[in-house]
Image (tube, rainbow, N blue to C red):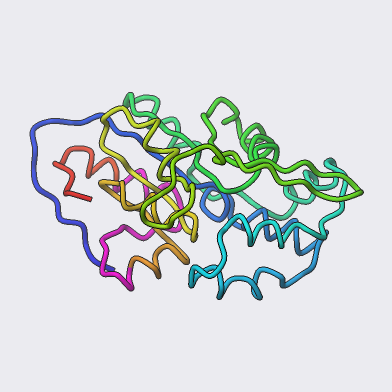
Amino acid sequence: MVAVPLVPSPAVAPLLLAVDFDGTITMRDTLHVIVDEHGCEGVWDALEPDLRAGRITIEEAMSRQFSEVKAAPEDIMALVRERAGVRDGIRELVEWADEEGHRLIIMSAGFRTVIDMVLDGIGLGHLEVVSNEAIFSEDGCTLVFSDERGEICELCDRRCKRHALSVRHEGEHIVFVGDGISDRCVSGMADLVFARAHLAEWLDERGEPYEPFEDFHQVIARVREWDHQEPAAA
């Protein structure tokens, strides 16, 4: 892990905090939780090598993951509530951002109905969410991808979170928090990156700077410190 250099500055800049959902806000990826129970367990493990190598897209992998999922919406929600968990400190991060006048948005490759349910359950249903959607039924699952009309990313040659963040960016310094393959491109836009799991491994391979984290209390403490420094170039 490469340390992020800190250079003193007299100004405190406004921040845009972009936070991934699955495996970042939640302890377990809700997509995996759903597929393992109502689809074909282990399908992600079979798809992941091709996804990591860029031989298939995230959308293709998700479509294959959910092709066998058949469950009523209420069963999906009950399962996620029981098994996904929420990472400690997320409410405190949102409160701190509100108090300091920073913006915080949720950026996810997951599903809006699931995200809204989890956020509502912890009192954060007011947050802006950028995500895909899934329509669940006992007859099957239909995925609706939100970025079909977004710009093609020059890094991954697909429509990814990078476009979604760029159209919402209002000139603030960017803090990104994530863990997965869908967070690769967008992390490169950030002035400060918090990473774990696959995203941390991927950044390590490239010698790119980031801050490791296991809960959002660590994120708050580090951003408080960094908020009074001049952000290094992304």
Q: Is residue 50 above or below residue 188?
A: below
Image coordinates of residue 232 in percent, x first then y, are 16, 49
Residue positioned 47% across, 66% down in the render = 198
Residue 104 percent coordinates (x, y): 42, 33
Residue 88, horizontal then vertical, whole percent: 52, 48
Report the magenta residues as a range: 204-222
Q: Quadrant of the N terminus?
A: bottom left
Q: Is residue 84 left or right of residue 179?
A: right
- 215 within the magenta span: yes
Q: Residue 232 versus residue 93: which sits nearer the camera?
A: 232
In the displayed structure, 109 sits above or below 127; it is below
In the image shown, does 92 or 171 lie closer to the viewer? 171
Which residue is located at x 80 percent, y 47 percent? Answer: 76
Residue at 57%, 58% (x, y): give it: 58
Taking the image as shown, residue 134 lies to the left or right of residue 131, namely right
**Depth check, front residue: 1 or 60:** 60
View extreme (right): residue: 139
